[in-house]
Amino acid sequence: MLAGLPYDCGEGELLARWHRAKDLVHRYNNTPSTDREGLTGILRELLGGMGRNLWITAPFFCDYGENIFIGDNSEINHNCVFLDCNRITIGRNALIGPAVQIYAAFHPVRASERLREDHGEGGMVFCITQSAPVTIGDNAWIGGGTIILPGVTIGDNVTIGAGSVVTRSIPSDSLACGNPCVPVRSLK
């Protein structure tokens, strides 16, 4: 999965990790926002790594959690979805707006390469999946409703306008927006 090769997300070990993350996310989303110690404890179990002063407003959703790494003083607003089938790295002092979706997973475009006829564990059919990492630099602000696709790197000191669809990497010190998201000016 992390190598970016096609894989079956219904495979036993991956499915067990997925269920573990769903249980932790459920606990997190149902813990009072005033219980900072409890919330931090759950995040330490869920995430691959986290810096100091991380704030994630519930509800928050992810696939595995263990592939998410977030730096110091970062804030993730509510209703964010991180499909962390590969590494999602977010730098220090990041602001991730509400309803941001970060996808490190994708499926083959051809149906014949994506679909399986056999049923995985539990009688569910899972599509063949691939993944690519997503990296967001230090001091980035990702506007609400933005979608970030697999393999994208967003540099340091970048602002992404609300509702953007980031299909390609964005260089540091840029204001970028749109669908597809493109740099519109330098912030140096």
Image (tube, grey):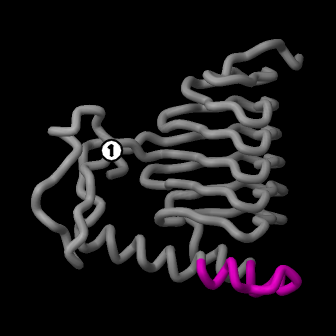
| Residue drawn 48% across the image and 45% down it | 104
Classify 119 as above or below 26: above
Name the residue beneath numbered marker 1: 130
Q: What percent of the width, then of the height, locates residue 181?
A: 66, 23
Foreground: 140 or 126?
126
- What's the amino acid at mark 1? Gln
Q: What percent of the width, then of the height, locates residue 136?
A: 66, 39
Q: Is residue 185 left or right of residue 114?
A: right
Q: Is residue 35 left or right of residue 67?
A: right
Q: What percent of the width, then of the height, locates residue 16?
A: 34, 77
In magenta segment, residue 40: no
Foreground: 143 or 188?
143
| Residue drawn 74% across the image and 80% down it | 39
Crowdedness of circle 1 by 10 Å Cα count: few (<14), some, many (20+)?
many
Foreground: 58 or 48?
58
| Residue drawn 15% across the image and 39% down it | 112
Q: Hey, which quadrant is residue 34 in on the image?
A: bottom right
Which image quarter holds the C terminus?
A: top right
Q: Hey, which quadrant is residue 80 in on the image?
A: bottom right
Foreground: 14 or 93?
14
Classify 59 as above or below 2: below
Element type where label 1 sits in the image = strand
| Residue drawn 59% across the image and 32% down it | 153
* Region of the chain picked out in magenta, as a range: 26-39
Q: What percent of the width, then of the height, locates residue 170?
A: 66, 23
